[in-house]
Amino acid sequence: MEAAIDYLRTKGLAKAAKKAGRVASEGLVAVARDDAGTSASGVEVNSETDFVARNEQFQEVVKTIAELGLGANGDLAALLATDVPGAGKSVTDHMTDMVATIGENMSVRRTAALSVSEGVVATYIHNAIAPNQGKIAVLVALNSSGDQAQLEALGKQLAMHVAAVNPLALSKDSVDAAVAEKERTFLIEQARESGKPENIIEKMIEGRMRKFFEEVALLSQTFVIDGESKVEDVIAKTAKDLGAPVTLEAFVRFELGEGIEKKEEDFAAEVAAVAGS
């Protein structure tokens, strides 16, 4: 019996290894929160097909991993090494077993976590497939001593805004320097092609960079909920209504498969190849 178990385990691992090279850009992003609502985690767990993402067994595993993400505090290596309750093995080993069972390459791609000393970390899932699981996941951390229900409502709206607009940074000052320099270079080259003198170009670039920062930084963006207020003004108004300061500490946005180079498959050719093999 022990020899049989070892054989099956070996076969399962071999099966998983064969699938490890396949592109896994489907799957689910998921969120989990602690009972107090002051900490939350987000994870992306990939599979090869959307069909597997709709598998209840896969969804249950994703739910568990998202909950374990609260303890990992945004550390992917720590999350992968965490024991899965009831499984008697780490997340990494459990995923290897899942690959062998379901028959597709799967992986935990990334995780993040936010927490506040007081206030809320609001969560939002766009295109939800299962509770707290879908195609876009957002966390928004609001630090405040104000009424938690009102903070929750604001956080939910801000999270929806982040899902829709996909800001690059929290504030103008936190925009990545390399991203800003790339945009500046592009705008300078674009302006020079118009034939304008350098002194005019310099003034043009100043104005266009100000507009760029306003468009990509969350706090200076136009709030999608009302289409006219700046996000920072919406937060200031809520703080006034609450009678307590409200600080938007951070946000996280995970979109399923972003940044993964997807291989275009010729399905007809693949079926023909299988039929001829």
Image (spheres, helix red, strand yellow):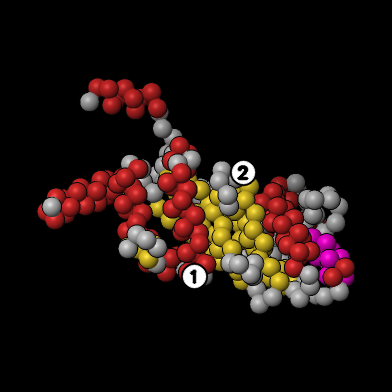
Q: What main secondary structure does the magenta stretch of the protein show?
A: helix
Residue 232 counted in the magenta span: yes
The residue depicted at 40 percent of the width and 28 percent of the height is 266
Stretch of the chain drawn in magenta: 231-240
Label drawn at residue 155:
none
Under mark 2, the amino acid is Asn
| In-front residue for pair 276/115 | 115
Question: Residue 157 in the image: x percent, y percent?
Answer: 74, 55
User: Which secondary structure, mark 1?
Assistant: helix
Q: Quadrant of residue 167?
A: bottom right
Towards the viewer: 203 or 134? 134
Q: Position of residue 260 (x, y in %)?
A: 47, 48
Position of residue 1 measured from the top left corner of the image (x, y, whole percent): 13, 52
Taking the spot 76% from the left edge, 59% from the top edge, the residue there is 153
Mark 2, secondary structure of its residue: loop
Q: Is residue 16 left or right of residue 25?
A: left
Image quarter (top left, top right, bottom left or bottom right) of the C terminus: top left
92 sits left or right of 187 in the view:
left
Mark 1 = which residue?
71
> Which residue is identified by label 2?
127
